[in-house]
Amino acid sequence: MDYRDGFIATIGNTPLIKLQQASEETGCTILGKAEFLNPGGSVKDRAAWAIVKAAEDSGALRPGGVIVEGTAGNTGIGLALVARARGYRCTIVIPETQSQEKKDMLRLSGAELIEVPAAPYRDPNNYVHYSRRLAEEMAEKEPNGAIWANQFDNVANRQGHIETTAQEIWQQTDGKVDGFICAVGTGGTLAGVAMGLKQHNPDIKIGLADPMGAALFHYYKNGELKSEGSSITEGIGQGRITANLEDLEIDFPYQIPDEEGMPILFDLFEKEALCLGTSCAINVAGAIRMAKDMGPGHTIVTVLCDSGTRYGSKIYNAEFLRSKGFPVPGWIS
C-alpha cells in the first residue's frame, strides 16, 4: 500500500511545475516548486516541522508544551498544525495588517492568536520581540516546556531545507538544475536550498528576488543594508542578515517592484490556472529576470510558496487593487 502516515509525513515531496509562459518568454525551463500543496498550504510547513523536531530532539519541548512564535501568517499556520498533530499548544503573535484569511486559518488551526500593531524590527513592540518576551514568560511556568520558535534566527529552519527541499529539487531535475531563486522572509528557504544544492554542484547559480521595502538587494549588490519603497506582498522582505542568511552567497540579486510582479501573478492564474500568493509574484518575476541574464537553455527553479486563496480579500479583490493603484484584471471585476 502507498500512503502517508498522518500530517507530518505529508510535508514535503511537492512536485515541480513547468511555468509555460515564463519558459516560453525566456527560452529556459522555469520550474515552480509547488509548496502550496503542503498539508498546511505553504512552504512554511517545512520550517515549522524542522523547528519543532529540533526542539523535541533537544528535550526543550515535551508533550503538552507550548510553541510560541511571531509570524506574518504561514509559519504560524504550519506551527499550529504541527502542534495539533504532535500534542502541543500554540500561541501566535501576528501583525494586525496581515490578511484576514490567514488570521482565520490560524484560529481554525487551534492557535491562540495575539494581534499587535505593525511596527519595524527596531521597535521593541515589533511582533517578533513581543513573541520572544511572551515565550520567556511562559517558559518559566509551563511544566512541559515552552519554546520560542524564532524562525528568523533558528537555523533548524535552514537545515530543514538543506535536508529536504534542496534534495527533492536535485532529484526531480535529475541534477540538471542551473539556478535557484526566491525571495527572503527568514532566509531559511533561500539559504537552505542554495547550500543543499551546492553540495551536489557548486556551480549552481543562486538568485535573490527582493520586494521593494526590503534591504537585501542593496546588501548583496553593494554591501549596504538599504531599503526603499514599499510592497503589498506579505511574509517576505527582510532588513537584516538573519542567522539563516549567514554565509549565503548571491550571484544574481534583483529588486522586483509590485508593478512587475503582479501582472505575472494574474497571468499565472488566468492562463495557467495557478492561483498563487503574493510572494509568488516576486519569485516568478525574479526567475524570469535570472533566466534572461543566464541565457536560453537553462533550468531555473523557484518557489510557489502558498495559494492565492489566503489573499482573496486583498490581491484578488478589485476594491483593494484600485485602492493601491493597480489595474484590475477583467476576470476579477
Image (cartoon, rainbow, N blue to C red):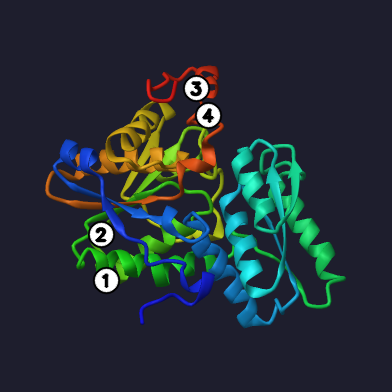
At 75% from the left edge and 73% from the top edge, which residue is drawn? 65
Question: What residue would you read off at disc 4?
Answer: 230
Q: Where is residue 3 in the image (x, y as percent from the top left)?
A: 41, 76
**In this orientation, does residue 96 appear?**
yes
At 58% from the left edge and 75% from the top edge, which residue is drawn? 53
On the rendered structure, is 281 left or right of 137? left
Q: Position of residue 16 (x, y in %)?
A: 29, 57
**Mark 2 nearby-residue class (10 Å; few <14, some 14–19, many ≥20):** some
User: How far apart, in angstroms, are the residues tagged by discs 1 and 3?
Assistant: 45 Å
Closer to the chain start, of discs 1 and 3, is: 1
Closer to the chain start, of discs 2 and 3, is: 2
User: How far apart, in angstroms, are the residues tagged by discs 2 and 3?
Assistant: 40 Å
Q: Nearer the viewer, mark 4 or mark 3?
A: 3
Question: What residue would you read off at disc 3?
Answer: 318
Closer to the chain start, of discs 4 and 1, is: 1
**Mark 1 nearby-residue class (10 Å; few <14, some 14–19, many ≥20):** few
Q: Which of marks 2 and 3 is in front?
A: 3
At 62% from the left edge and 55% from the top edge, which residue is drawn? 76
Question: What residue would you read off at disc 2?
Answer: 204
Q: Position of residue 28 (x, y in %)?
A: 17, 46
Q: What element carries label 2?
A: loop
Q: Which of 275 and 252 is in front in this view?
A: 275
User: Measured along the vertical axis of the image, is residue 111 above or below residue 49?
Assistant: above
Residue 200 badge: 1
User: How far apart, in angstroms, are the residues tagged by discs 4 and 1?
Assistant: 37 Å
Q: Does the residue at mark 2 contact the one at mark 1 (Cβ under 8 Å)?
A: yes
Q: Nearer the viewer, residue 78 or 182?
A: 78
User: How far apart, in angstroms, are the residues tagged by discs 4 and 3?
Assistant: 20 Å
- Looking at the rendering, in which quadrant would you find the N terminus? bottom left
